Image (tube, coloured by chain):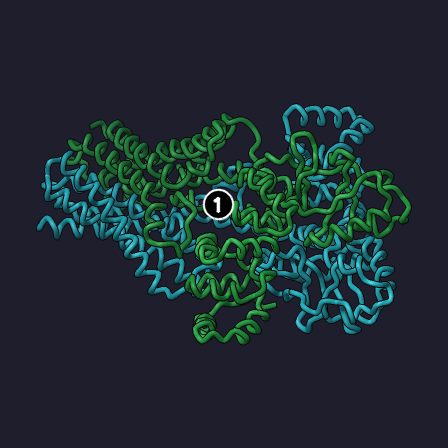
Chain colours: A green, B cyan
Amino acid sequence: MTPFKLTDELIVEIQQLIEDKKNTALRSMMKEFHYADIAEIAEELKVDEATYLIKLLDSEKTSDILAEMDEDIREAVLNNLSAKEIAGELEELDTDDAADIVGELPKEIVQKVISQIEDKEHAADIVDLLRYDEDSAGGLMAKELVKVNENWNVLTCVKEMRAQAENVTRVHSIYVVDDEEKLKGRLSLKDLLTTSTKTHIKDVYISKVDAVNVNEKSEEVAKIMSKYDLEAIPVVDEIGRLVGRITIDDIVDVIKEEADKDYQLAAGISQDVEADDSIWELTRARLPWLILGLFGGLGAAGIMGGFEEMIAQHAILFFFTPLIAAMAGNVGVQSSAIIVQGLANDDLKGSISNRLVKEMLLSLLNGLILAALLLIFTWIWKGDFATALAISISLVVVIIVAGIIGTFIPLFLHQRGIDPAIATGPFITTSNDIFGILIYFWIAKLVLGI
Amino acid sequence: MTPFKLTDELIVEIQQLIEDKKNTALRSMMKEFHYADIAEIAEELKVDEATYLIKLLDSEKTSDILAEMDEDIREAVLNNLSAKEIAGELEELDTDDAADIVGELPKEIVQKVISQIEDKEHAADIVDLLRYDEDSAGGLMAKELVKVNENWNVLTCVKEMRAQAENVTRVHSIYVVDDEEKLKGRLSLKDLLTTSTKTHIKDVYISKVDAVNVNEKSEEVAKIMSKYDLEAIPVVDEIGRLVGRITIDDIVDVIKEEADKDYQLAAGISQDVEADDSIWELTRARLPWLILGLFGGLGAAGIMGGFEEMIAQHAILFFFTPLIAAMAGNVGVQSSAIIVQGLANDDLKGSISNRLVKEMLLSLLNGLILAALLLIFTWIWKGDFATALAISISLVVVIIVAGIIGTFIPLFLHQRGIDPAIATGPFITTSNDIFGILIYFWIAKLVLGI
């Protein structure tokens, strides 16, 4: 399989077909494409063209296309559809995807759309899902699942399952509940293939079943599912009733979003943006950290101004401030990144003080190696051993302090329940720049006896 | 389900049990834990203790524990096992996990271990898998899958499947092949539940099936599976024969590793390290970029030295170098991160020149806002409008250049087939520091007419 590659020629061709209203050609062309590919195509079209395409194709396919599309463009397209048309799309979607779409609709039309859904049970399920937080198990789960009562026998079970399976794209596990809908265990499809039809479910089901609470954070659900290699996990409410099911494909999205978010935070981008967003959106995401950096820089300027009297005899010290600031920033980012990642992957063990001692030793080792290099280069270059020594000693201390700050801040934030990822990038760089420069001049002054 | 939480008390308790050789207590204690949790426990034990635990438990469970364990610790434990014991563990594992473990064994014992595997077919499958690159579809896939011949009927099919399913943890899809083992299509379990037993597979299978080539890069496989929401994908060789299957749980690992790697590169960490690695390993991963930063700093010092004559009248200019360098670094990292992420997610469209124009406009907008702030602050603070203006104009130019460098370099690397992620972090920061300072002094000189 070669993955689908979107080309400009293809877009132009499709736009021409839409302009000429060549519906038959369009339909047969789209038949060849996977809905995920059509979603990509639609994102490149103008909103009116995308709407035309959506209205042209069967809602069985367009519902999946819509579910796959970028939020902003989907919103624009849905704006062009009637409540009845939107309801028709929702009818075809699994409840989790349908609820995601309904959640984005303007409040005033939600009720209108929901009331137009013909399958009342489906509509009720969607409404149920709307009340859960987006970032919780409830926000991720779908209502579609296959469940059987522990009092049935395998034959009844298979019969009921056939009916239920109609609505479920992938079966994975068959969940076993009692008369009160409480989750008791599971049956694997494999087991069902090898059990006699008269056996009671009670006697064959596996009582050990992993489940998550409906209020569990989605990040936590992702951790559980990937750690235990689960492809689906049932969701229970506060009193243990089976209310939904989360499948691994939703978790893949959670993992990717988490990773993207952490990466962006580390790079000083404060909102979820993409390269193709507008200049205005990108500015709003990038400016806050830059303003922080600006004030950090003003702080550094202030500090250096305080050492102005040193300029006369030791101008050379000033030439090394960018080096010191950069090293402080780099070390801080490295230390914090390792901690942030360790926290995200849950593999940080031991106490904070042990971590700090380790980071201190690590920074000392790195600092000594780097300082030795710096000493040799600067000495040869400037021929002034005392100054070279002063700068090098400062570098070691600055690196150690930077490492400790980079280690401590994310750990501290994490302990306070704040996402440690915000501590990486510009925040660490800026604070380390300032501390670095302050320490540098202070130590240089001390060593040079000024 | 509350996720398992490893505590120091638990480790101490287990260590005590091991020391006292309380095997029955240990066995019944471990029975309560998932293998993924025992792997976590084992990673906290000393190697001898972990080995003791592995030797104590059934290989059915220990094989999964070993497969789940951190590579380094697994290697150490396997070192304590005989070839026969290792073979026993491999016997219980799926071929993909078994091949991963064999791939790490010292070359001289591989043959000995393989020859001790009793199931000769299993051994042959493992050997087959060893020849594929770790980062390819072949390196990810398992040999375990359920396949049926297109000429069978549903009854034969179900019978054969029962036998095959014994070896397959999760069935997902039933693949249909012809007499030459070429992949023809698939059957879903659901279809099988609703088809009469005499029907020929030829007449019911779905001929549309996504498959990847055995040489496809694992990153590409991850993209395909997550884009098309596939939970398993068959792998075919150069002439279309079905050779294996990749399941989504392997892909989850690929996605996480990719994200972790990009994050580390952005933070200037050049190898795959964890917070719990040794100081020496961490130094090796962190030092290279720090040395780059050191030379960048020396370069900056050299540039500033070239403007030394300005110090007498305009010392204030020198105080603002950390600010300029930091802003250049921050903007560069932001721009490059957005491009790197866009490339990773395959959602960058349009030409390089369009990107650069957009980034220029974006940087201009950000730069003007920041420069206005800087102008006001510096003017009020220092009372010197000409200098404040010179610094502010420089800032705008520096930000634009930094944005362009940050955008261009990852795009350029990507075009050359180099991972653009290496361009983020210290590389961009360092080069932007130098360019920024050079541009800054040059423009300041021009504006102030020195």
> What kind of residue is marked 1?
Ala
Please tell me which residue is depicted at 62% across the width and 43% down the height of the picture.
Answer: A124
Q: Which residue is mark 1?
A: B285
Residue nearest the observer in this picture, B300 or A265: A265
Q: Does residue B296 appear left or right of residue A126 in this picture?
A: left
Which corner quadrant of the image does residue A201 belong to?
top right
Q: Is any part of residue A176 visible from this angle? A: yes
Residue nearest the observer in this picture, B79 or A284: A284
For the N terminus of chain B, the image quarter is top right
Query: Residue A309 in the image: x percent, y percent?
Result: 15, 31
Q: Does residue B357 appear left or right of residue B316 in this picture?
A: right
Which corner quadrant of the image does residue B21 belong to?
top right
Q: Does residue A68 appear left or right of residue A437 in this picture?
A: right
Q: Secondary structure at mark 1?
A: helix
Q: Is any part of residue B256 visible from this angle? A: no
Which corner quadrant of the image does residue A181 belong to?
top right
Please tell me which residue is depicted at 62% across the width and 65% down the height of the picture.
Answer: B215
Query: Residue A281 in the image: x percent, y percent?
Result: 35, 49
Q: Does residue A175 appear left or right of residue B314 in this picture?
A: right
Residue B334 vertical placement versus A180 (above, below): below
Residue nearest the observer in this picture, B21 or B229: B229
For disc 1, the neighbor class at 10 Å (few under 14, some 14 to 19, many from 20) is some
Query: Residue A406 in the image: x percent, y percent?
Result: 42, 34
Please tell me which residue is depicted at 84% across the width and 60% down the height of the picture.
Answer: B158
Query: Residue B398 in the image: x percent, y percent?
Result: 25, 51
